[in-house]
Image: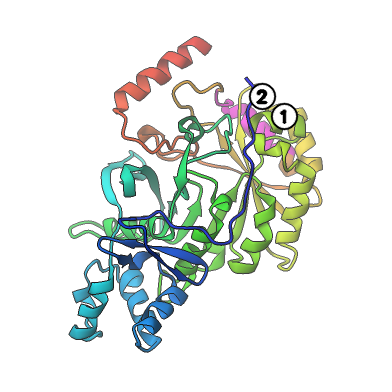
Amino acid sequence: MPVTVPTLQIPLLTKSSSFLATSKSVRAPGNVISIVSINRINLLGLNLKGLETFFADMGEKRFRAAQVLQWLHHFGVDDLNAMTNISKSLRATIAEQAMIAGPEVVSDHTASDGTRKWVLRMAGGSDIETVFIPDGNRGTLCISSQVGCQLNCTFCSTARQGFNRNLSTAEIIGQVWTARRLLDQPDTRPQAVTNVVFMGMGEPLLNLSAVTDAIDIMLDDHGYGLSRRRVTVSTAGVIPAFAALRERVPVSLAVSLHAPTDELRNQLVPLNRKYPIAQLLAACKTYVAEESRQKVTFEYAMLRGINDQPSHARTLAKLLQKVPAKINLIPFNPFPDAPYQRSDDETILRFQQILITAGLITTIRRTRGDDIDAACGQLVGKVVPRQRRHNSLELRQGVHA
C-alpha cells in the first residue's frame, strides 16, 4: 500500500489549541495564546516575553514577568496565592485574567528499571504520553509535541493512530511542569529532570512556534535553567525548519535516519521522498557549522533483515564520513502488529564495530521502560489494558517466528 507524504507547512505563528474554552485569543511574541476558562490565559503557555506583554497590558512593571516565570517553573507552584513576593491585590488582578492549568494525569506507571510513564490528558480529551528515564544523577524527560503524528514512519507505533493536532506551548511545557511536580512528592526520593528530549509523540518541527516557545522556558534561568546541550529536538528531517530552530533556540539536534540509502529510507521514513538524504545531511552540516564541537545525533533503529547487514553499516559509514556525527543504534522496540522484528544482539554489535572502525562515534541505546511500553517507538497516547496489548504483540511475534 503506498504511503502518502503529507504536504508540509512550517508555521511561524500557530494558534494554540490548549484549554480553549472560548473563541477569543491574545497575541504574544512568537505565538498566539489561547484563552481558557471564562477568557483566562493559561500562564504555563507564556514564555518571558509573553509574560512581559501580559503585565505591560495590565500597566505593571516588566520585572513581574520574571517573578511569575520563576514561581511557575523553578518552584512549580499551581496556585497564584503561593507567589508571596507579589501583592495580594496584584494576585487578584492576575487571577481575573489568567490561571495555571496543567494536564490531567490519567495513568502513572513505573517500569522495573525505574523508567516512569505518564498518560496525560489535554484539552478536548486528547491523550499523550510522557516518559522519565532516570540514570544515576541524570534524569531525561521524553516529551511529545503533537497528538499523534502525520509522517507515517513504518516502525513507529505513534504513526498507527494518525494525526490529531499540534500541542500548544502550555501543553508542551505542561509535561515538564507536571513531571517535575510528580517527581518531587513527599516521602519519595526527589528526582531531577536534567535533560529534555523531543522524542515522544509527533514531529516537533511541524509545530515549530509552540516548540520553540516551550524551549525558551526550559532554557530561561527563571524557568528550568537547562543548557542548550541538555535539550534535544529529534526530527525525521523537516529541513525548512532547521534554520529557524537554529536561529531561535540552537539546541541539540537528532535526526531519525534509520537507513543509509534513499531507496530504503523512502520505505521506512516517507518524508525522505520530499527531503532526500543528500539534502538532509547538507542541512545538518549547516546546523552545526558555527560550533566546532557540536555534533548531530543520527538515530538508527535496528530492524532484523531490513537495515542491519554489514553492507548497510559500510554504506552508512561512507555516508557520514564528512558529517559531524554521532550514531545511536536503537534496538527496535516491538508493538502490536509491528511489521518488523528487533535485530539480535550479535548483529547490532557487529554493525556498531564496523562504524567504530570507520572512525564514527557509535553507541547502542539501552532499551528502557519496555515492560510498560515506554520505550522508543512504543508511545501511542491512549490507555490500553496492558495484557491486551501484549497478547496482540505475542500473537504477532508468533506468526513471524
- Residue at 50%, 44% (x, y): give it: 202
- Residue at 42%, 14% (x, y): give it: 395
What kind of residue is marked 1? Leu
The picture places residue 206, in percent across and down from the top left corner, at 57, 50
Residue, far front: 23
Residue highlighted by disc 1: 264
299 sits to left or right of 311:
left
Spatial CA distance of label 2 from label 1 is 9 Å
Closest to the camera, between mark 2 and mark 1, is 1
- Using the rendered image of the protein, determine whether residue 359 is visible from the camera's viewpoint: no
The picture places residue 92, in percent across and down from the top left corner, at 20, 78
Mark 2 vs 1: CB contact within 8 A:
yes
Residue highlighted by disc 2: 306
- Residue at 57%, 25% (x, y): give it: 344
The picture places residue 193, in percent across and down from the top left corner, at 40, 60
What kind of residue is marked 2? Ile
The picture places residue 239, in percent across and down from the top left corner, at 69, 51
Count neighbours of disc 2 (C-alpha within 10 A) and say few if under 14, some if 14 to 19, many if 20 or more. Answer: some
Count neighbours of disc 1 (C-alpha within 10 A) and say few if under 14, some if 14 to 19, many if 20 or more. Answer: some
Of the 4 image quadrants, the one containing the N terminus is: top right
The image shows residue 87, relative to residue 231, as above or below, that is: below
| Marked residue nearer the N-terminal end (2 or 1) | 1
Q: Which residues are magenta?
A: 341-354
How many marks can you see?
Answer: 2
The image shows residue 383, relative to residue 234, as above or below, that is: above
Q: Quadrant of residue 345?
A: top right
